[in-house]
Image (spheres, coloured by chain):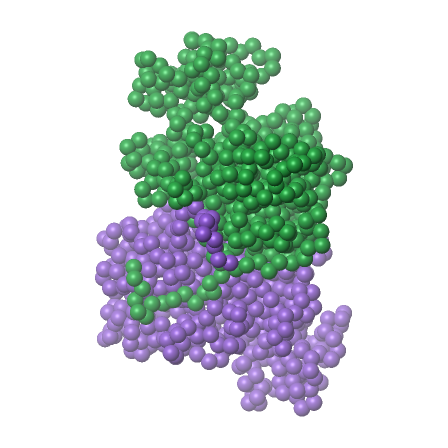
Chain colours: A green, B purple
Amino acid sequence: MKPREDAVLSTMQDVPLLISRILTHGSTIHGDSQVITWTGEAEPQRRSFAEIGARTAQLAHALRDDLGVVGDDRVATLMWNNSEHVEAYFAIPSMGAVLHTLNLRLPPEQLAWVVNHAADKVIIANGSLLPLLAPLLPHLKTVEHVVISGPGDRSALAGSHAQVHEYEDLLAGKPTGYDWPELDERTGAAMCYTSGTTGDPKGVVFSHRSIYLHSLQVNMAQSMGLTDQDTSLVVVPQFHVNAWGLPHATFMTGVNMLMPDRFLQPAPLAEMIEKERPTHAAAVPTIWQGLLLELTANPRDVSSLTQVTIGGSACPPALMAAFDKLGMRVCHAWGMTETSPLGTIARPPAHAVGTDAEFAYRITQGRFPTSVEARLSGPGGERLPWDGESAGELEVRGPWIAGSYYNGPDGEPLRPADKFSEDGWLKTGDVGTISPDGFLTLTDRAKDVIKSGGEWISSVDLENALMAHPDVMEAAVVAVPDDKWGERPLATVVLSEGSTADFASLRAFLAGEGKIAKWQLPERWTIIESVPKTSVGKFDKKVLRRQYAEGELDVTKL
Amino acid sequence: MKPREDAVLSTMQDVPLLISRILTHGSTIHGDSQVITWTGEAEPQRRSFAEIGARTAQLAHALRDDLGVVGDDRVATLMWNNSEHVEAYFAIPSMGAVLHTLNLRLPPEQLAWVVNHAADKVIIANGSLLPLLAPLLPHLKTVEHVVISGPGDRSALAGSHAQVHEYEDLLAGKPTGYDWPELDERTGAAMCYTSGTTGDPKGVVFSHRSIYLHSLQVNMAQSMGLTDQDTSLVVVPQFHVNAWGLPHATFMTGVNMLMPDRFLQPAPLAEMIEKERPTHAAAVPTIWQGLLLELTANPRDVSSLTQVTIGGSACPPALMAAFDKLGMRVCHAWGMTETSPLGTIARPPAHAVGTDAEFAYRITQGRFPTSVEARLSGPGGERLPWDGESAGELEVRGPWIAGSYYNGPDGEPLRPADKFSEDGWLKTGDVGTISPDGFLTLTDRAKDVIKSGGEWISSVDLENALMAHPDVMEAAVVAVPDDKWGERPLATVVLSEGSTADFASLRAFLAGEGKIAKWQLPERWTIIESVPKTSVGKFDKKVLRRQYAEGELDVTKL
């Protein structure tokens, strides 16, 4: 629609949505709020948002004046969740450069690949991670400077081609204010590579605009809805999709952050909850499962923690119910690197609150916020209705949803046809249904669905049903080739210690109470010690499929 | 900062922030939520967001196909708060036209002036407002169509130059879907003229972007923070700065709206609270003062209503305390037409909650959200510190803050130097202080400050202190000329029925307990029947100044 000659122009100011604004707001209006970093010592490190604001300015001066970071240079971080990582989160984009968070759980060769692909100029690393970084560094040709923060032996970096700096030395004496530039809000601010299970990792570049809008959403009462009366235990790593936006969102509202640094084991997590009394936590289910075992073995006062956002993969309903009993209300969220990540969040609708229907809503992936448009695409690309029954691949669109990947082989943005539709929507690779009131239920990854005799069997439904069995710790179901049906499910099961359950009884359990249709019940069963996980804690089913193909699993056929 | 040749581009989708997205979201994902409109009958009108979505599409078809609305034509509304007004709110901007809400409390000549200045093509009016519209219509030459909704005698429009339509007839049979255009988010979406006390009214044009961002803010837990479990009683008129953004914000989250239509008197308001049990209300203090008297005379069960957002002018602390006793927690917000309007909101900081300091925070205007930057400008234009003591004129900047007014005499945007600084900030005309933690306390309008002997006396401080007296219903203090001091305060007081308080005792009350410094105490006193109000319910002090100047007030000098 072309404006007419006497077009009505908005009289609003043209002010860009910038991360430097979030920083300035948080470090002044919420200057008393704190980032509390666990150190393993008697006392954690406590830094106010005001101090972090000042140190962020110092870091930016150091990066510009001492290390020569200009324009859109990429500055990488290889760090745990801690206050220095928060400083990097704000300094690098605010000065106009691009923050590249490195996933410290990636295999070393992939880590080297992403640093080289992003052409990072600087790496800020925790001292405790030098054993990982040092052997890689000779392969990171674009890296001119390494900045080390926190305890750890520096000697392994001797003789490196990169200049090595101490984080605190760089900051010392620098001005505590910085004249942040007025950038275009669509400028790249932070990048994160997907830990894809096939092919090279792919870079997603978040803009100032996308991060700002996402932060507003995280703070909406119907999302996480935290205020400065809250303290959030940020277990989800800062290298994993901006820790779900929490460092930015908390600076908008003064929410205190409790950062576990490298102390991600169940015992220290339980200790920090008891001592620092967070009201909220954000984590993937596997970490939370470990915490439950720890709290069962060694009970502690964790009563402060009433709200837990779980994402990364679905929280098994049995685990959710167990946490309900502890007074920790789990709220499901769904997202991926390409969705910044908030795609849905499972706050039950008003009519279900306090009724029997509530739990059924809570175990869905949740509702889409206003800024995320969703549609379901059938096997033939047809649009499927939101009827709660038609299962299709989820496609999404919105201002914080990726429309391409960074820097393809020809230097142009990468838009693979299996990831982006022709009209620009993201194909999530997740298969599920959407109810008429907009609740998403994921049934599987498109690649993990079991195609049996022309029908789909959801591996996730089988896993959830199995994990509800009291003797089953974990279960993963994968498709294996079958002469008659094309594919059939293989159930791989981790039993709890001392369990005497046999496969026939597990199969009968699945069949009971109308849980699973008879034709979907697995014939093939195997016991494993633990389900293999990806670097971000998801079930790594390609490992199981390979082990099966190579005859490494001891499979019983019922 | 110029991007380098290998600039890192964001890989985010470029999706505009549009009102049509808010509409589609609300009418699908929150399709069951309701707009409940009071009718004065036994049952209110109830319409689901899904129905409103369908009717909005029908209205857009009617405007385009039957009335010829194209491009950025202005479509005005002369309506109370009701569901049809919500439909107009969404249909007009979503189709690419501009909604112009007419303030039905403006003097007729000003109303005609703004319609002609905006060159409105269509007016949608409530039948109950035809007695106001009919005599004006001959003067509204640009208006081609009048659309009437709801009860009221239509005969006064006979012989009008404009075509007259029935709202429901226009909608009947139209398609219930509309292919909303993909607009630039900076397109004008809605306009609202300021009811300035001097000079011609000035038009503020909100963009899709500004309304969308403002709606996200309204929904943040630290702002109004409502969810689909809430029902909001929207007393603040839809013609008054988009009803503080509530119609848009509620469609983002499924909050039900209770709309009083023309039933704004204390008795029906009390009745609708008892019957429909809203959890939240938004209103100006004068309406709420009337409600308090009504509830005192005729107690009702208003226990559902726990949160009241008060804006438009400051809520006297005594009134706030009275509502606390009723279980209605008043939350102050400050804003103006030029600020969309959310400028601040008074949620106390975490450290004050539950302490004696809490009330002191609640009677401030509140804290600025991330998207509103603020500074104080002294009499000489110098920047003043945020020390809670230095009083200056408040200036603000942000994506939902006006940077100009619509269509000056030469067709260019209007940027009067007394309203906008050279660097584009809005000069609010409000004088106050900002505390180090960002809480704004307004002491006065710049034009109402009393300049006495080279010092400033705040008229508002005097009014609040006076209104805390049990016999004082209302009090307004204005500057009057004084030979010795330049200006001195005149106290105009409305006493409660049967009161025997005299001026000397009121003056002693002000002086007591260190409330007001001795040199600030008024010498001039007068009793009035009620404080004159502007069309939006604010004290109209220019009337009092004129009455004093013309000798119409019976003034006692102590």
Horizontal arrangement in the rendering, residue B43 relative to residue A86 (left or right): left
Is the C terminus of chain A in the top left, top right, bottom left or bottom right quadrant?
top left
Is the N terminus of chain A in the top left, top right, bottom left or bottom right quadrant?
bottom left
Identified at 70% across, 76% down, the residue is: B506
Residue B515 showing in the rendered view: yes
Nearer to the camera, A437 or B22: B22
| Picture coordinates of residue B129, whole percent (x, y) | 36, 69
Identified at 71% across, 47% down, the residue is: A169
| Picture coordinates of residue A114, whole percent (x, y) | 50, 37
Horizontal arrangement in the rendering, residue A350 relative to residue B135 (left or right): right
Nearer to the camera, A400 or A383: A400
Identified at 61% across, 72% down, the residue is: B377
Q: How many marks?
A: 0
Vertical relation: B514 (above or below) B398: below
Nearer to the camera, A184 or A227: A184
Vertical relation: B424 (above or below) B87: below
| Picture coordinates of residue A80, whole percent (x, y) | 62, 37
Identified at 55% across, 30% down, the residue is: A108
| Picture coordinates of residue B532, whole percent (x, y) | 53, 77
